């Protein structure tokens, strides 16, 4: 099997001994969001997850809900965000995260091609579990877009095997039972999910949801290949951190997992 | 194929009704949906479970509910109008049929916490009632707009020992209450049963709720036979929010020659103005913009203020077995008054939509002399204050 751009980039870095950091930025949040993407790329991200906001984000907690609503209110659209990503020049692979209705409405083939043409390497669609992947999964693959699948703390082992085998780019281990959002401490489930995924697969395993601080990131990478950090960064952006503030936080995370 | 011979039985593989339905949920919820599917299949096949459900629906819930033949209104409209009286069931609507079943199922699966969403508050009240009856914990999510317009039902739920949590996100109505309930469930699924209020959501919910509501249609079929000298009605009509009272009603008549009509609110007419999409775990029809962002529904009746519709209705519409017109707020308010004045029954605003359609079509697409069965899904107490405000 030919490995995609995202998976290859992450594998190469991991195999060279580096732990992986994937920050999440809500597309269309603030006029300077593309600057934020570039700044995050330059501050030590190994790939960047870009949220395409949806009106009804059921996997998201209050921070990303608010960011999505602000972006939509200021006129953000899926096509506008994807077009902007074509000019991002972030220096690392880009992965979009959105809900299935956005993909379904655009049409599988059209969405896959649009993403590929914009240079987006991967897609995360959290309300599209492996059983419903048909249609999108194949169109994405043939356009060269890697669909990252999620593993939850409740996923039984046999299902987890199938998910790891079908996931492209990396495996996204959901660290807690719950929606995105900051947590005071690392959930015990994060390490458990990381451990079982690592036993099943050689593709990079990243843990996301509830990783809020450099300390928590450090704890998780004792087992996982890397982390996805969303709400903690978006919360700073909502408070006006801007590209510089975002870069500073990402640099902090980088330093913690490199230490 | 005989008319409807294959319709409204089990869903197809993966919970599909044709292209609609399915299970589009975050991975965290997949095992719970599978557990629920297996749990329902075993309960539904278990005579002890069915016996307990029937006993509660009868001795506690007041079933069977009667079918009332309207005298004055029938004469006025030139048809034979029969009302299936779900307004007379305990808690004042058909919602109890569903929640008693789901609460018993939750108990059987060892889940002692119920969460629910509510629009008008009728499903929330019913869920709180079932929780009180079985000694379960109950949390109800309700949009801030609905808390405002259905304040009495909020207090009812609290009297019944439930907690009501006001939802401030999005359009602050039913769809946002569902989002919040799903977010809760993602975090608590191991101890909590999501008691969904209509024939919607991920598989197996649309199927479970239809099966629990088919008692409406099964009873009505037999009652109509008695009143109509062994015949079925010519037209069967019910209002559609998510579509549970309509699905339960249609299930009893889908294999007859009756014309099946589900009436939506004009401001939430997902069957007329919606397009296929995937939201709240199901593929169905939704009001949405060209990017796939979901639009807000807007109706005088909180219970029909939903931008989507249950997947089986999308299917019944697609194959032409049922039709789904809509009714405007103004016709609905007129129908609300008409039923009160001519029959001494104050309906909920939701079924007043079904009546508005009957009034509009009587003597037109409903030929004079037709026998029309309409499900009166709930009583109007909750809406009286609002109607007073709107009409003064
Ligand atoms: C009396 C009544 N009828 C109908 C509905 C709509 O629900 P459904 O379409 O699921 O029957 C509601 C919802 O709150 C209701 O309270």
Image: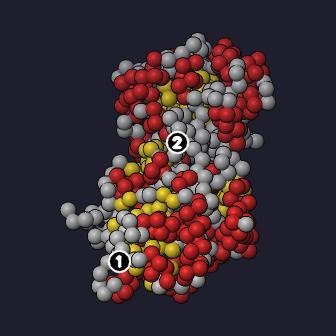
What x and y, as percent, mark residue B298? 60, 52
Placement of the N terminus of chain A among the 4 image quadrants = top left
- Gap in angstroms between the C-alphas marked 1 and 2: 40 Å
**Disc nearer the start of the sequence (1/2):** 2
What x and y, as percent, mark residue B193? 57, 62
Residue B225 figure quarter = bottom left
Note whether ligand 1 is within 8 Å of mark 1.
no
Is B311 on the left-hand or right-hand side of B9?
Answer: right
Residue lying at 54% horizontally and 19% vertically, measured from the top left: A83
Q: Which residue is mark 1?
A: B369
Residue lying at 74% horizontally and 28% vertically, measured from the top left: A237
Local crowd size for mark 2, using a 10 Å CA cut-off: few (<14), some (14–19), many (≥20): many
Residue lying at 39% horizontally and 84% vertically, measured from the top left: B223
Q: Is residue A41 above or below residue B180?
A: above
What x and y, as percent, mark residue A174? 58, 40
Residue B214 figure quarter = bottom left
């Amino acid at each position: 099997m030919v490995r995609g751009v995202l998976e290859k980039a992450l594998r190469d870095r991991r195999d060279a001994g580096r732990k992986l950091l994937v920050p999440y930025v809500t597309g269309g949040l603030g006029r300077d969001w593309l600057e934020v993407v570039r700044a995050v790329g330059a501050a030590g991200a190994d790939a960047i997850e870009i949220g395409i906001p949806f009106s009804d984000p059921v996997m998201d907690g209050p921070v990303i809900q608010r960011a999505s609503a602000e972006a939509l209110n200021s006129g953000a659209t899926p096509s506008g965000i994807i077009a902007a990503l074509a000019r991002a020049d972030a220096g690392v692979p880009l992965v979009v995260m959105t809900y299935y209705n956005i993909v379904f409405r655009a049409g599988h083939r059209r969405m896959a091609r649009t993403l590929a043409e914009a240079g987006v390497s991967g897609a995360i669609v959290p309300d599209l579990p492996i059983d419903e992947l048909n249609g999108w999964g194949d169109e994405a693959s043939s356009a060269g877009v890697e669909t990252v699948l999620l593993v939850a703390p409740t996923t039984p082992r046999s299902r987890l095997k199938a998910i790891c085998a079908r996931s492209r780019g990396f495996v996204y281990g959901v660290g807690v039972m719950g929606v995105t959002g900051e947590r005071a401490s690392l959930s015990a489930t994060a390490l458990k999910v990381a451990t079982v995924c690592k036993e099943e697969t050689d593709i990079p395993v990243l843990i996301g949801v509830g990783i809020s601080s450099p300390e928590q990131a450090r704890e998780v990478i004792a087992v996982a290949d890397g982390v996805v950090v969303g709400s903690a960064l978006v919360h700073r952006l909502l408070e006006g951190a801007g590209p510089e503030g975002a870069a500073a936080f990402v640099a902090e995370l980088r330093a913690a997992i490199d230490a | 194929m005989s008319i409807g011979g294959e319709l409204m039985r089990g869903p197809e593989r993966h919970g599909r009704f044709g292209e609609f339905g399915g299970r589009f949920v975050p991975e965290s919820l997949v095992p719970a949906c599978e557990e629920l599917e297996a749990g329902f299949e075993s309960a539904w096949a278990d005579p002890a479970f069915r016996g307990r459900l029937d006993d509660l629906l009868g001795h506690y819930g007041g079933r069977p509910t009667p079918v009332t033949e309207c005298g004055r209104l029938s004469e006025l409209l030139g048809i034979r109008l029969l009302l299936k009286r779900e307004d007379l069931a305990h808690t004042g609507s058909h919602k109890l049929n569903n929640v008693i079943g789901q609460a018993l199922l939750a108990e059987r699966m060892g889940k002692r916490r119920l969460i629910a969403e509510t629009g008008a508050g009728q499903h929330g009240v019913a869920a709180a009632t079932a929780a009180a009856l079985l000694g379960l914990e109950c949390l109800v999510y309700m949009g801030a707009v609905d808390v405002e317009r259905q304040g009495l039902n909020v207090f009812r739920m609290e009297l019944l020992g439930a907690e009501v949590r006001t939802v401030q996100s999005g359009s602050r109505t039913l769809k946002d209450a569902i989002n919040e309930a799903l977010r809760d469930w993602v975090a608590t699924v191991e101890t909590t049963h999501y008691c969904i209020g209509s024939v919607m959501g991920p598989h197996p919910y649309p199927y479970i709720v239809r099966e629990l509501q088919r008692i409406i249609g099964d009873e009505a079929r037999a009652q109509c036979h008695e009143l109509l000298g062994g015949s079925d009605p010519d037209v069967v009509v019910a209002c559609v929010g998510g579509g549970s009272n309509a699905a339960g009603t249609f299930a009893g008549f889908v294999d007859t020659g009756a014309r099946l009509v589900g009436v939506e609110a004009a401001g939430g007419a997902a069957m007329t103005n919606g397009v296929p999409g995937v939201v709240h775990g199901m593929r169905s029809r939704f009001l949405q913009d060209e990017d796939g962002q979901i639009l807000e529904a807007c109706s005088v009746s909180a219970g029909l203020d939903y931008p989507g519709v249950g997947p089986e209705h999308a299917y019944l519409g697609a194959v032409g077995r049922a039709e789904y017109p809509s009714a405007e707020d103004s016709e609905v308010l007129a129908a609300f008054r008409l039923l009160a004045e001519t029959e001494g029954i104050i309906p909920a605003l939701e079924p007043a939509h079904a009546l508005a359609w009957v009034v509009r079509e009587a003597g037109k697409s409903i030929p004079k002399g037709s026998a029309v069965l309409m499900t009166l899904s709930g009583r109007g107490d909750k809406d009286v204050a609002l109607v007073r405000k709107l009409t003064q």
